[in-house]
Image (cartoon, rainbow, N blue to C red):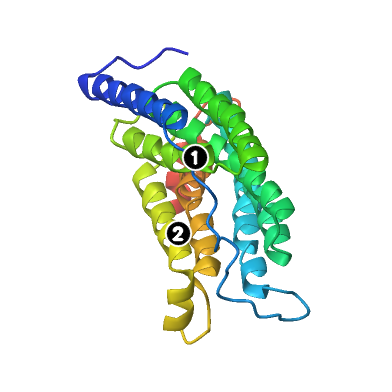
Amino acid sequence: MSSSPMTPPRARGLAALSRLSDAETGLVLGAAALPASAHQRDFADLRTLWGIPCALDVLSNLAFALAGAWGWWELRRVPPGALDATSRALAALFFGGLLCTAAGSALYHWQPQDAGLLWDRLGMVLPFAGLLGLAAATRVSARAGVAAAGTVLLAGPMAVWVWVHTGNLLPWAVVQLGGLLVVLVLACLPRRVDGLALHLGVVVLLYALAKLLETADHSVFEATGGWVSGHSLKHVLAAGAAWPVLAALGSLVALRHSDAAAMPLVMPSGQNGAHAVGVARRSGA
């Protein structure tokens, strides 16, 4: 696959990515440990519904499961050749990761303990890797997409391992928030001509809003009169960050259907080689 020319905006964006990567590495190696918050499991909505503890925090993870299943279905409908193999694999990783996130997060919120949080965070590594890989593949190259996804798949579990054994959350924060900054930088680069039409700015906005809702868990619960908490809404909005990927794949499927609808108008009609466009014109007269 031929790579796109290195335009000045892309060159500046890649330089910014390199500086950001160096800064993240220096932060992890040089900064003091970041302990977990003493209130990390102090969730606002503790209601039990239908026998499910912390019910809305558990059930809101269905949004991740729905987005993941929808993505797999949409990906299967994309015709061969309409999407390069690397982007297809990264999209599969992203949507499969959403299903794992739904399971891990639901398990954790059912009984909030460190054991469940371990699986929650490991599940989150997969969609992070798929999304960052897709972002790099659409803006830089397929090789960059594979490298970005591979980096997250390696760094994510290592960050979780550090947290489990030392209590230091800094590496995990760098993987999570640093990855978001990388996507933000990539969103400023021009899309490759043959890249997936992925609106990265929308992804960043939705995920940033989800993190804000997470920090405002109790405030949102109080503001809604105890109807829904910020953390429950955070799950829904974070799952909504899959929408730009779904929309990009949907446009490829729609293009296939439009091409299929146009085919009878240009196919030969048989013995004398006359085109069906003439038949279509006569039938529409």
In the rendered image, residue 89, in percent from the top left (x then y), is placed at 61, 30
Hey, what amino acid is under mark 1? Answer: Ala
In the rendered image, residue 34, in percent from the top left (x then y), is placed at 49, 44
Residue at the spot 72% in from the left edge and 74% down from the top edge:
53
* Element at label 1: loop
Relative side of 72 to 51, left or right = left
Q: Is residue 101 above or below residue 220?
A: above
Residue positioned most to the left: 8
Q: 10 Å neighbourhood of mark 2: few (<14), some, or many (≥20)?
A: many
In the rendered image, residue 115, in percent from the top left (x then y), is placed at 74, 51
Residue where numbered disc 1 is placed: 33
* Element at label 2: helix
Residue at the spot 44% in from the left edge and 34% down from the top edge:
135
Residue positioned most to the right: 51
Q: Is residue 247 above or below residue 111?
A: above
Q: Is residue 162 above or below residue 209?
A: above
- Residues at marks 1 and 2, CA–CA distance in whole angstroms: 25 Å
Residue where numbered disc 2 is placed: 210
Q: Disc number at residue 271?
A: none
